[in-house]
Image (tube, grey):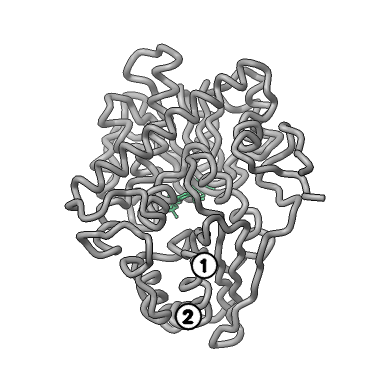
Amino acid sequence: MNRAPATAARAEPTRPPLLSTTLRMEPDDVRAWVVVDRVVDGLAMGGTRMTATVTEGELARLARAMTDKLALVDLPIGGAKAGIAPAPGAPVERLETMRSFGRAAAPLLHGGVYLGCDQGTTYADRRTAFDAAGYDVAHRPGATRLTVGWDELWTHMADVTGFGVAVAVLGALRAAGTRTPQRIAIQGFGTVGRAVAGHLSDHGHLIVAVADVRGTIEDQSGLPVAALTAITSSDGTVDRTRLPASARVHASAGAWLNVDADVLVLAASAAAVGADEVPGVRAGTVVEGGNMSCTEPARRLLREAGHTVLPDVVVNVGGAAATGCVLAGIAPSDLPLPRLSAWLRDWISTRITRNCELVQELHASGSADPVARLLAEKGVHRAPAV
Ligand SMILES: NC(=O)c1ccc[n+]([C@@H]2O[C@H](COP(=O)([O-])OP(=O)(O)OC[C@H]3O[C@@H](n4cnc5c(N)ncnc54)[C@H](O)[C@@H]3O)[C@@H](O)[C@H]2O)c1
């Protein structure tokens, strides 16, 4: 076997995915694809993204990142991703689109390719697609037997990706021997950002800034997370008319970058920090809560400038890992919901903490790309097989 150099850039599909297919949708001006990067023990998994701009190439990169995430936590499942691009300018017929997607993706779902939620799709969308496909996780041979429905489990576990990101932050702060509270800035106040804010604030840290698509809200004495969450819409936009009096609002697009903070959590879109942004980063620790939040050059430059970087595929695996533990039957069967949730959180927390430690150790010993090194040790390589 041809081994990739350990420093090869990750998440760049140097090898084509195992399978990349176009689905025939109704109406036929909606485009949709499923990309499977890798199958392990008959299983692959990833979310379904619905945006106007999604492309097959973007899905291939995300499916590859999914392979990496799952391999890093030793789950025997390959990475996949699906995408739906509604017709430009036309209103999205949500129910019909998800039904059509479910019908077209049915052979893949039943064949072991699990397609959950991602950007632009909700639990209700997922249920519509699964119903149209006649697919039910509870009936998958080998899966954990649940005492609750899939939707009920996920309503309870909606914060789990942010929980995992917060675990990574707490581990890094512990390793650095810092005092509590530390000052945390968060770019993105959606599902992930709000959960990170809640968990870190529960551990005594100060959330000094949060940014949404409209700008940055800052209070160096600490924002009231629960009150802020209560005035935030489901898409992560904070109502500016109901902000606490002490909050300062910055309307400029990149204000979150320059906030005085110890930790910067990126939980919005890809490439939020590129090489040009690196000199403006003030926080000592940068955490990629979102997928590919830093570009590869930015990750390298941040590390060279002495920042601690906690990479996406290591820290934002919570939701994928919880799903994977159930699909692969790793989570114990027949536990009541609170005990299953506690079991999953403990499993996730142990692996994220350990992987963050390994990334830091490899970085300290001179590795330019610690994640590629960890992946290579797990048999996931980045160079084309010859
Ligand atoms: N939700 C999950 O379980 C999960 C799991 C793994 C990875 N991710 C990734 O994490 C990221 C965030 O996911 P989410 O589910 O929280 O998304 P979301 O859609 O719920 O929230 C996104 C947030 O980012 C804000 N935002 C968008 N553009 C911005 C900009 N330019 N500047 C500042 N804020 C901006 C939005 O206003 C919103 O507050 C995405 O990259 C997603 O792919 C999410």
Q: Which residue matches tag 2?
A: 97
Question: Is label 2 in contact with label 1 (beta carbons under 8 Å)?
Answer: yes
Residue 4 lies, with reference to residue 236, above or below; the image says above
**Between 313 and 36, which is closer to the camera in this rendering?**
36
Left or right of residue 69, residue 13 in this image: right
The residue furthest bottom is 27
Q: Which residue matches tag 1?
A: 50
Residue shown at the point (36%, 78%) measured from the top left = 131
What's the CA distance linking mark 2 and mark 1? 10 Å
Left or right of residue 368, residue 39 in this image: left
**Between 274 and 211, which is closer to the camera in this rendering?**
274
On the question of residue 132 being in view, the answer is: yes
SS at circle 2 = helix
Left or right of residue 242, residue 270 in this image: right
Residue 234 lies, with reference to residue 31, above or below; the image says above
Dot 1, crowdedness within 10 Å: few (<14), some or many (≥20)?
many
